[in-house]
């Protein structure tokens, strides 16, 4: 199933949750909608599911207008952040729900329903919990049951709204891997919403970065990390050092100091320089674009994180490998191995 | 028991609170009830039976319990709809309507009785048009029924409201996206989740209606065998100094009410076990 979204606009009062969004999702993709809260990612997901309606714009599934149908007719599996399991039903009945409410003409008989539920519980590896109630399960188990329930109706599209947002870090990591392998197995076109960049980069085939109701960048996980299209994406994905610089005809200046960097196509004027922490290479003083003094050093596993005050006055944090030891008070030069300059 | 009592707690209050609870409940509830039973012992079983099986007593009990149950059922349905509107929608005047629900709680029952009677009397605002249709409300069992609905409504609304507030609207969306129609969502998802609260509301509204005296006697007309409620018959017997008769009727009311409340309680427990609290 392919999904196409064209020029979608949705306002809540004067707040534009979606401000002209265009998106194409290919068949069998596992797509992440990544953005801070309020970026419109959940609203977009809910409109695709039929749980919300846009003010204007189009949504189509395989070229067919989806907005003409309600949630019930769209055949979309939806997984909620807080599971939304039916607490008065056993795990088994929760998963069977979508099969039991089908119109009589197409409804499976009891034996077929049982077989299908068993199959789904096996798929999420929780068949031994069939007779429990949702309140007796852990968060991770609940979310897997919610997923099995959504898959029961053989959805054409699977939508997950911050599926691991309510879980603790360790369970979240396990479920990420599990979701990816599950997607590989069932191969349903899937979109999941997350504000966790690591989750998006690890699980998805393609990542859509959103901010303030607009799409900032669409690309592979490597793409959005290595070639951020906008200042927002650079700042949001991965930790960045941001320095205010002045661009004049391709030359870059930080305060009074001319930097040994090229601005490329960036227009002249006030700009911002973005560098990943680990892309700042340490050398002898005077050797690089910046000079500074080490203020403070802490070790973080494989790297040492140093706070460096630049002679221009700014203080930045860099990650350096631990083989070359830094000490407080050291004077060093810094060369950005990769950097981007964005106007504004 | 001793294990509970002797285990160290942060707040050492078990002995004190337990003692107070038991003595207070005994003084306030158990001893008066025991007195009631003792009083009926003055009657021989034959006398007791004769009082109960008299036409007037049976009719009074039938009127009280029958109408109370019918009124509680009406309150269950209407109360659920009111709760739904109050919890799920935002409309102008919502807070006002929410406060109005409590009026029957706070109003002195005699005031309610007088108000309802004048409203439904043959010349009243509602009584007159209804009389034109040939429906007589005041001074008939129908009047009792209406008074019982009036006093019972807050019990259903106030017991169901917090539970519905707790019920995540997402489960309705989940049901919808799984293909359930609105009707299936209500029947299979919402009502079962509210089940225990609905039962409690029903039981409370019923108990209140059975015991209601003040508002009912004004509108009832109090015609023996037709619109005479059991509590009124008890008062009549007392004013005739037939204390044993009065207590006999009271004991029957007590036992029937207790059995019903107990049954509802069991039912509610059973329903709650199926929805363990999380």
Image (cartoon, coloured by chain):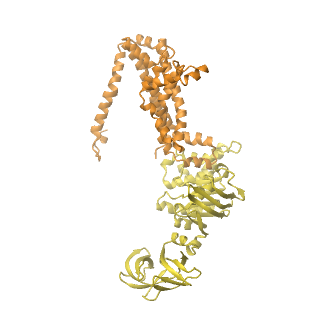
Chain colours: A yellow, B orange
Q: A56 or B153, which is in the foreground? A: A56
Q: Position of residue A294 (x, y in %)?
A: 38, 81
Quarter holding the N terminus of chain A is: bottom right
**Drawn side of residue A83 relative to residue B259, left or right:** right
**B59, B133: nearer the viewer:** B133
Q: What is the x, y in percent for residue B275?
A: 49, 42
**The quarter of the displayed image where residue A194 is located:** bottom right
The answer to whether residue A97 is above or below residue A340 is above
The correct choice, above or below, for A325 with respect to A115 in the image is: below
Q: Nearer the viewer, residue B98 or A168?
A: B98
Q: Quadrant of residue A182?
A: bottom right
Q: Name above or below for residue B221 compared with residue B208.
A: above
Q: In this rendering, is residue B31 above or below A121?
A: above
Measured as percent of width and height from the top left, residue A22 is found at 65, 64
Q: How many badges with numbers are in the image?
A: 0
Question: Can residue A295 be seen?
Answer: yes
Q: Viewed as shown, does residue A167 lie left or right of A95?
A: left
Give percent across and percent down for residue A36: 52, 63
Report whether residue A182 is seen.
no
């Amino acid at each position: 199933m392919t999904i196409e979204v064209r020029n979608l606009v949705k306002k809540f009062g004067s707040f534009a949750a979606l401000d002209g969004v265009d998106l194409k999702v290919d068949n069998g993709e596992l797509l992440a909608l990544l953005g801070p809260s309020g970026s419109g990612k959940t609203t977009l997901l809910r409109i695709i599911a039929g749980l919300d309606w846009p003010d204007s714009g189009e949504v189509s599934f395989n070229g067919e207008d989806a907005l003409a149908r309600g949630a019930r007719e769209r055949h979309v599996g939806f997984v909620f952040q807080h599971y939304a399991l039916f607490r008065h039903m056993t795990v088994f009945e929760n998963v069977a729900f979508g099969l039991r409410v089908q119109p009589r003409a197409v409804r499976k008989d009891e034996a077929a329903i049982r077989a299908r539920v068993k199959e789904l519980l096996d798929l999420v590896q929780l068949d031994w919990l069939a007779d429990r109630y949702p309140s007796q399960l852990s968060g991770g188990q609940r979310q897997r049951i919610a997923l099995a329930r959504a898959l029961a109706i053989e959805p054409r599209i699977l939508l997950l709204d911050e599926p691991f947002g309510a879980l603790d870090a360790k369970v979240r990591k396990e479920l990420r891997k599990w979701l990816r392998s599950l997607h590989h197995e069932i191969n349903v076109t899937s979109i999941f919403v997350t504000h966790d960049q690591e989750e998006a980069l690890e699980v998805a085939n393609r990542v859509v970065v959103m901010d303030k109701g607009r799409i900032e960048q669409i690309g592979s996980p490597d793409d959005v990390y290595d070639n951020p299209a906008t200042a927002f994406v650079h700042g949001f994905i991965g930790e960045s050092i941001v320095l205010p610089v002045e661009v004049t005809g391709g030359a870059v200046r930080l305060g009074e100091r001319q930097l040994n960097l090229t601005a490329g196509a960036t227009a002249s004027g006030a700009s911002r320089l973005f560098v990943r922490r680990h892309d700042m290479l340490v050398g002898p003083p005077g050797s690089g674009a910046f000079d500074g003094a080490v203020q403070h050093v802490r070790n973080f596993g494989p790297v040492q994180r140093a706070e460096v005050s630049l002679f221009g006055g700014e203080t930045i944090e860099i990650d350096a490998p631990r083989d070359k030891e830094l000490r407080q008070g050291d004077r060093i030069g810094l060369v950005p191995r990769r950097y981007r300059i964005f106007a504004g | 028991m001793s294990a509970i009592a002797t285990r160290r707690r942060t707040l050492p209050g078990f002995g004190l609170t337990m003692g107070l609870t038991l003595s207070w409940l005994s003084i306030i509830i158990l001893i008066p009830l025991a007195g009631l039973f003792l009083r009926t012992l003055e009657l021989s079983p034959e006398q007791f039976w004769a009082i109960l099986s008299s036409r007037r007593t049976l009719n009074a009990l039938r009127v009280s319990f029958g109408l109370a149950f019918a009124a509680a059922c009406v309150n269950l349905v209407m109360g659920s709809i009111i709760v739904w509107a109050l919890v799920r929608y935002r409309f102008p005047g919502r807070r006002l309507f929410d406060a109005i629900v409590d009026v029957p709680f706070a109003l002195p029952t005699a005031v309610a009785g007088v108000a309802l009677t004048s409203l439904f009397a043959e010349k009243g605002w509602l009584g007159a048009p209804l009389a034109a249709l040939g429906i007589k409300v005041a001074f008939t069992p129908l009047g009792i029924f209406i008074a019982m609905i009036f006093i019972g409504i807050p019990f259903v609304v106030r017991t169901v409201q917090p539970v519905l507030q707790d019920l995540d609207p997402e489960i309705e969306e989940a049901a919808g996206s799984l293909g359930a129609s609105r009707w299936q969502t209500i029947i299979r998802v919402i009502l079962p989740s509210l089940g225990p609260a609905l039962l409690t509301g029903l039981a409370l509204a019923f108990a209140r209606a059975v015991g209601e005296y003040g508002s009912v006697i004004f509108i009832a007309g109090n015609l023996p065998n037709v619109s005479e409620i059991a509590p009124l018959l008890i008062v009549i017997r007392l004013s005739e100094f037939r204390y044993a008769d009065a207590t006999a009727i009271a004991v029957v009311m007590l036992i029937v009410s207790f059995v019903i409340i107990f049954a509802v309680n069991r039912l509610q427990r059973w329903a709650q076990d199926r929805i363990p609290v999380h």
